[in-house]
Image (cartoon, grey):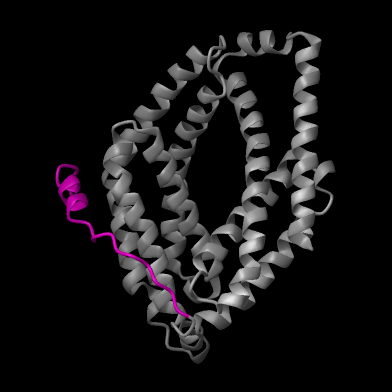
């Protein structure tokens, strides 16, 4: 495939369609529908993202995070050697997307401040690298490979009884069992949130995001009364994710300032004492509110 042919391939990508899960649907069918929706979202935003649109970039990152969450959710059914290869390529793509998105968020949180200009310059460089990646044969091989894997990857043809059984399990049965397991793991991880270091807190945030998307995937696949209880947890997850996201954005911004301009960072460290106190109070407040939210999720 040549780079010149790639845009034409994007224009004829599969049409976007609604996704409908049902309780009796086989897991393999549900997985294909969920992954197709994620890939269609990536295709829909590709042109705008390649033109520098920050909203399209954000939506693409969400679509890919949802894609990874779905694959993890159905992990025992879909794990195969082809996904291992595609996952490695996805890490390459995600690194480019993340570098640019982190700068977008940092710029938004630095409006009117001296460091805004430095961050804008860094964003220009990061976007040029992202644009080159999005226009490369490597990207299009990954994208086409994902479609092929979803439709006819090795996981679809394994004939051992256990693999065939996993593909045939009704959505209502599998999702109920899997959601309960993920919820239990998150409850364990989120204990002692206020005293956690940033790495453990980051893992709680990622687990929250995955459970949130898994619950959203399950709509229509669980009985209405059962899904109603998950909807309550979903509301708390969104709030918890927002609070932990704000903490993460603050930490990422500090790291970016260190990387783009060390002298500016030293000046940043010489801020007035009341400003440093304000930052510590903000972190404490966000953590306190987040801990309260996760207690509700665990109840």
Query: Is 75 located above or below residue 161 in the figure?
Result: above
- Image quadrant in which you'd find residue 30: bottom left
Query: Is residue 105 located in the magenta-colored stretch of the structure?
Result: no
Which region shows up in magenta?
Answer: 1-22
Left or right side of 14 for 219: right
- Image quadrant in which you'd find residue 274: top right
The reply to whether residue 155 is visible in this rendering is no
Query: Is residue 15 located in the magenta-colored stretch of the structure?
Result: yes
Image point (15%, 47%), residue name: 5
- Image quadrant in which you'd find residue 227: bottom right
Q: What predominant SS class does the magenta segment belong to? A: loop
Foreground pick, 268 / 232? 232
Query: Is 91 located above or below residue 263 in the figure?
Result: below
Foreground pick, 29 / 87? 29
The reply to whether residue 57 is visible in this rendering is yes
Left or right side of 163 for 209: right
Image point (51%, 23%), residue name: 107
The percent coordinates of residue 54 (x first, y second) are: 40, 33
Image point (40%, 23%), residue name: 125
Image point (44%, 24%), residue name: 123
Indicate the quadrant containing the C terminus: top left, top right, bottom left or bottom right: bottom right
Query: Is 221 located above or below residue 114 in the figure?
Result: below
Foreground pick, 55 / 256? 55
């Amino acid at each position: 495939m040549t780079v010149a042919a790639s845009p034409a391939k994007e224009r004829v990508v599969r049409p976007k369609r609604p996704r409908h899960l049902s309780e009796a649907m086989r897991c393999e069918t549900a997985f294909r529908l969920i992954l197709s929706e994620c890939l269609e979202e990536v295709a829909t935003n590709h042109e705008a993202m390649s033109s520098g649109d920050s909203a399209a970039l954000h939506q693409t990152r969400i679509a890919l995070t949802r894609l990874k969450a779905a694959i993890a959710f159905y992990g025992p059914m879909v794990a195969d050697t082809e996904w291992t290869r595609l996952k490695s390529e996805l890490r390459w793509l995600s690194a480019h997307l993340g570098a640019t998105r982190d700068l977008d968020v940092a710029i938004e949180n630095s409006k009117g401040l001296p460091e805004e200009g430095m961050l804008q310059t860094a964003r220009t460089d990061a976007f040029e690298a992202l644009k080159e990646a999005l226009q490369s044969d490597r990207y299009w091989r990954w994208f086409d490979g994902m479609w092929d894997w979803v439709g006819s990857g090795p996981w679809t043809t394994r004939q051992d009884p256990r693999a065939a059984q996993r593909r045939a399990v009704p959505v209502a049965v599998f999702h109920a069992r899997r959601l309960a397991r993920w919820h239990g793991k998150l409850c364990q991880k989120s204990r002692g949130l206020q005293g956690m270091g940033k790495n453990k807190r980051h893992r709680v945030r990622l687990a929250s995001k995955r459970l949130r998307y898994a619950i959203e995937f399950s709509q229509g696949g669980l009985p209405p009364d059962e899904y109603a209880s998950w909807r309550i947890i979903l509301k708390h997850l969104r709030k918890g994710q927002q609070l932990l996201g704000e903490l993460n954005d603050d930490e990422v911004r500090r790291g970016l300032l260190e990387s783009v301009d060390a002298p500016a960072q030293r000046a940043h460290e010489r801020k007035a004492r009341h400003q440093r106190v304000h930052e510590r109070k903000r972190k404490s407040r966000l953590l306190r509110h987040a801990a309260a939210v996760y207690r509700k999720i665990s109840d």
